Image (cartoon, rainbow, N blue to C red):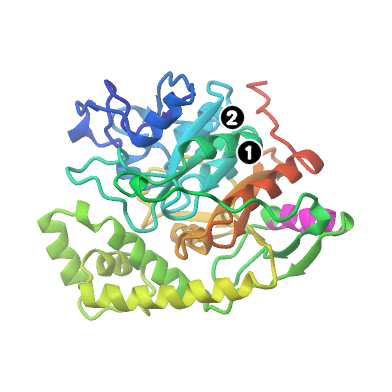
Amino acid sequence: MTIKESFGLAGTPTTFGIPAFAQNIARSDSVAVTRLRSAGAALMGKTNVPPGLMDGQSVNPIYGRTVNPWDVGRTPGGSSGGSAAAIAAGLSALEYGSDIASSIRNPAHYCGLYGHKSSFGVSPTRGHSLGEHDLSPDIGVTGPLARSAFDLELALSVVAGPDEPAAVAWKLELPPPRHKRLDQHRVALVTNDDFAEVDAEVAQELEDLGTFLESEGVEVSRNRRPEFNSRELHALYLILLRAATADAAGDEEFVAAKEMARGADRHVREMATLNAYGVSLSHRDWLRLDAERARLRAAWREFFADHDLMLCPPLSTVAFPHSDVPPQKRKLRVNDHDVPFENQLFWAAYAGLPYLPATVAPIGQTDAGLPVGVQIIGADFRDLECIRFAQLLERRYRSFVAPPSFP
C-alpha cells in the first residue's frame, strides 16, 4: 500500500507540499504507519498533496500536479488526491489519508472510490504533522481509502484505537452494525440545498440510488435533516475549521487576520473574512462557537433517533478541471452558472463539524463518464454502520469500476 505524504514514514520526506520543508525527512513512523506495518502492510511509498493540505486539488511546487485517472485534465481532489489517484489507477491497493475538510471524501468521490472519514478521535493522528507540537487538530481525523468497502473495514480495524497515554487506560470497541440487510435500514436522502446548489447530474445519481433503495424495501425519507440553518452551519464550520489550523499562522498573518476580522462574527458571509475571524478568534469567542456546535451535535443525535443514516452529496460537482486560481477566488460551474468554490465545503461540514463518521461510496457516472459518489453519514461512533451500508451497496448496487485507461 501507499500512504499520504503528510504521514510520518521513517526515512522519507514529510513536506505537506511546502518548499521550505522539502528536506524534512521523517525520523520515525506515524502511529498509523506503525500499526499498519505491525499488521503486515508493505508501504511502498507516499502520495501527493496540496500545500498545507489546503485545496481540493493535489499540486505543489515540490512534486508537481497529480491528475485524475478518469480525465487527466481534471483534479483527483485533495488533500488526499494523490492517494485516490494511486488507488484508482491501480498503482496501490490501499491508502490511509486524513480529512478535516473532506480530504478523504472529496477524492473518493472524484475518483470513484470508497473512503471513510472516521469519528473524531477514533483513528490516531500522531505523526501526521509538520509542527514541533504534534497535537490532534479540532475536526481533523484520519481514515482509509480503497477500491472496496470491505478494505475500509480492514484498514480501520488495524489503525483505530487509543494512542498513548490513553491506551494504558481504555480500549476502543466500536458498536457493530445493527442491520445485515438493506431493507432493515431507515435512511434520509438529501440531494440538494438552496445554499450549496448541487449539480443536476450528481443530484440525479442520488435520486436514482434512492429509487433503488426503495425498491429494495429501504425506508427512505426525502429531504429530512436536523434542524439547522444552512448558512449558519457553513459559517460556523469555516470559522472553526480555520481556528483548528490557526497555530500554523505566522505573526504577520495573525496580525493581518485580526485587522481583517475586526467587528466580524459568525453571521459574516464573505469567506476571507470568516477565515480571518477563525485565525484570530479569542478563546472566549471559540468557547461560544463550540457551544453552538454542541447544540448542532444534539440536533444530530435527535435526528438519528428516527434514522439510521443520512445519504447526501459528498460535494456539489464531479471532479473539476485543473485550476491555478486560489481557492478563495475560484469559481465552479454548477448547473451552467458559476458559484463560489467555498460552497463545496458545505457538504464537508455535514459530518465534519459535529464529529460524525462518514463513508463515501461510488454510485454512478455522469454522461461524460466522471464518477459520482454518495456520502453516508452515521450517528456518533457508528463508523462500522456507515461502512456496512457501503458494503451492501457494493454488493447490491455498484462496485468499484476502474478508469478505462487503467483497467
- Mark 2 and mark 1 in contact (Cβ < 8 Å)? yes
Residue at (55% x, 28% y) in the render: 87
Does residue 247 appear left or right of residue 355 in this picture? left
Residue closest to the eye, 173 or 82: 173
Residue at (29% x, 22% y) in the render: 12
Type of secondary structure dominating the magenta stretch: helix
Residue closest to the eye, 332 or 26: 26
Does residue 152 appear left or right of residue 95 in this picture? right
- In the image, residue 378 sits, relative to residue 76, either above or below, namely below
Q: Amino acid at mark 2?
A: Ala
Part of the protein shown in magenta: 203-214
> Which image quadrant for residue 257?
bottom left
Q: Does the magenta run of residues contain 360?
A: no
Q: Amino acid at mark 1?
A: Gly
Does residue 227 appear left or right of residue 251 in this picture? right
- In the image, residue 24 sits, relative to residue 193, either above or below, namely above
Q: Residues within 10 Å of mark 2 (few under 14, many from 20)?
A: many
What whole-number distance in Å separates the C-alpha atoms at marks 1 and 2?
7 Å
Residue 112 is marked as 1
Image coordinates for residue 21, horizontal then vertical, percent:
20, 33
Q: Is residue 109 visible?
A: yes
N-terminal label among 1 and 2: 2
Residue 88 is marked as 2
At mark 1, the secondary structure is loop
Q: Does the magenta run of residues contain 210?
A: yes
At mark 2, the secondary structure is helix
- In the image, residue 265 sits, relative to residue 134, either above or below, namely below
Image coordinates for residue 135, horizontal then vertical, percent:
26, 50
